[in-house]
Image (cartoon, rainbow, N blue to C red):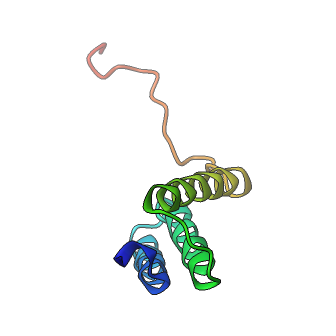
């Protein structure tokens, strides 16, 4: 089965890493790390069924994304708050 092949996950991680470089903002980086870890586990011989592989991928991606948000965070000035409505004047 294709989902249990380690190099498919590693190739997906590389593709997601390239997407992250094209659209910076740490959107795809968590998914890339999740795919790389799943690929590494499959390479090491840990055999899991497809549902468990997907759950593991989702959990690792979420944890990685949360860690990245804490470490890197939202930069000041990234979002702009407007208090004045342009239709009031």
User: Where does the image place residue 74, in percent across and percent down from the top left?
Assistant: 61, 49
45 and 19: which one is in front?
Answer: 45
Instruction: Say which residue appears at 48% left-offset and 63% top-offset.
Output: 49
Viewer-proximal residue among 17 and 46? 46
Query: Up-down: is 16 above or below 51?
Result: below
Residue 82 location, x and y as percent? 45, 28
**Farthest residue toward the left?**
87
Q: Residue furthest right?
A: 71
Horizontal and vertical percent for residue 28? Answer: 47, 64
Q: Identify the residue at the far top of this view.
A: 88
* Left or right: 50 in relation to 66: left
Give the residue drawn at x 57%, y 47%. Answer: 77
Compared with residue 6, is residue 84 higher up or lower down, i.e. above or below? above
Query: Image quadrant of residue 33?
Result: bottom right
For this view, does 44 lie left or right of residue 5?
Answer: right
> Is 3 left, or right, of 35 in this rendering?
left
Q: Is residue 89 above or below residue 10?
A: above
Task: Give the vertical position of 81 relative to 54 (above or below).
Answer: above
Residue drawn at (40%, 72%), measured in percent from left and top?
3
Question: At which x and y percent is residue 21?
Answer: 45, 76
Q: How many numbered marks, from 0 up?
A: 0
The residue closer to the viewer here, 24 or 11, is 11
Which corner quadrant holds the C terminus?
A: top left
Find residue 71 and report its image quarter: bottom right
Residue at 47 percent across and 58 percent down: it is 54
Image quarter (top left, top right, bottom left or bottom right) of the N terminus: bottom left
């Amino acid at each position: 089965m294709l989902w249990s092949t380690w190099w498919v996950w590693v190739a997906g991680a590389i593709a997601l890493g390239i997407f992250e470089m094209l659209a910076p903002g740490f959107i795809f980086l968590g998914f890339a790390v999740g795919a790389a870890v799943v690929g590494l586990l499959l390479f090491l011989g840990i055999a899991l069924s497809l549902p468990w592989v997907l759950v593991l991928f989702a959990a690792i991606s979420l944890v990685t994304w949360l860690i990245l948000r804490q470490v890197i965070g939202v930069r000041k000035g990234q979002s702009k708050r407007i208090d004045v409505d342009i239709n009031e004047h």
